[in-house]
Image (cartoon, rainbow, N blue to C red):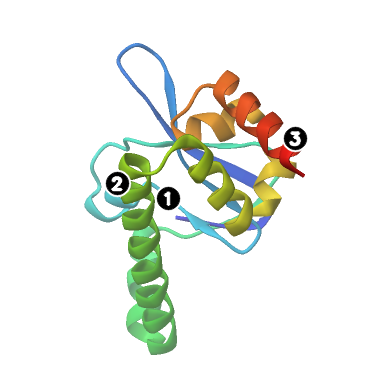
């Protein structure tokens, strides 16, 4: 599991056709990992790449377990972190099946404005589950309204 000290990472999976599907972005102050793989030891489903030059702190499962046993405040910290992550992923799942493309983009701009400035449009489109062309049309429509 990695903590982003500096930089920007992306987590994604590749389907059988070779298409990439964005899972999440992680920037300064965020933790990232293929959590299922980290805790189970099974093969990772998600790949993680740096979008920008990055500095990371990396912890192994053994060290994570030791730290959370020996330092109770860290156990609580990670429990709250994992709870918030679960809530965020559930909301994103609901949004992905219920919200229109424009609603997804507007919500992303409100929640994470730094994403719009730091991440290439094709990766944002993948994260939202839309084509880059659709994202371009949405951005143009929003600009014209202002």
Q: Give the residue number, with chain letter if any, for mark 3.
A: 144
Residue 32 spot, x, y in % from top left = 48, 53
Q: Extreme front residue here?
A: 145
Q: CA distance from mark 1 to mark 2?
A: 8 Å
The numbered mark at residue 108 is none
State whether residue 120 appears in this view: no
Residue 29 visible (yes or no):
yes
Is 125 positioned to the left or the right of 33 in the image?
right
Q: Secondary structure at mark 3?
A: helix
State the residue in front, 92 or 23.
Answer: 92
Residue at mark 1: 33
**Callout in the foreground (1, 3):** 3
Sequence order check: which comes first, mark 1 or mark 3? 1
Q: Which one is nearer the viewer's eye here, 85 or 132?
A: 132
Q: CA distance from mark 1 to mark 3?
A: 39 Å
Residue 143 vertical placement versus 62 (above, below): above
* x and y, in percent, of residue 134 in the image: 55, 23
- Residue occupied by mark 2: 37
Task: Give the crowd class for mark 1: few <14, some 14-19, many >=20 residues within 10 Å.
Answer: some
Q: Nearer the viewer, mark 2 or mark 3?
A: 3
Tell me what residue is drawn at x 27 percent, y 49 percent. 36
Image height of 116 relative to 107, above or below: above
Quarter-of-image position of residue 45:
top left
Q: Is 45 placed left or right of 42 in the picture?
A: right
- Answer with the quarter of the image where residue 39 lies: bottom left
The picture places residue 31, in percent across and down from the top left corner, at 51, 59
**124 shown above or below 98:** above
Q: Where, quadrant-wise, is the C terminus in this rendering? A: top right
């Amino acid at each position: 599991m990695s903590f982003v000290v500096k930089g920007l990472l992306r987590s994604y999976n590749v389907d059988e056709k070779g298409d990439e599907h964005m899972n999440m972005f992680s920037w300064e102050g965020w933790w990232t990992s293929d959590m299922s793989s980290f805790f189970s030891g099974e093969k990772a489903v998600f790949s993680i790449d740096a979008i920008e030059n990055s500095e990371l702190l990396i912890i192994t499962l053994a060290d994570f377990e030791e730290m959370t046993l020996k330092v109770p405040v860290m156990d609580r910290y990670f429990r709250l972190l994992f709870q918030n992550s679960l809530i965020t992923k559930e909301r994103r799942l609901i949004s992905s099946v219920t919200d229109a493309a424009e609603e997804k983009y507007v919500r992303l701009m409100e929640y994470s404005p730094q994403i719009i400035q730091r991440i290439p449009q094709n990766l944002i489109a993948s994260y939202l589950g839309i084509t880059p062309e659709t994202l371009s049309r949405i951005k143009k429509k929003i600009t014209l309204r202002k």
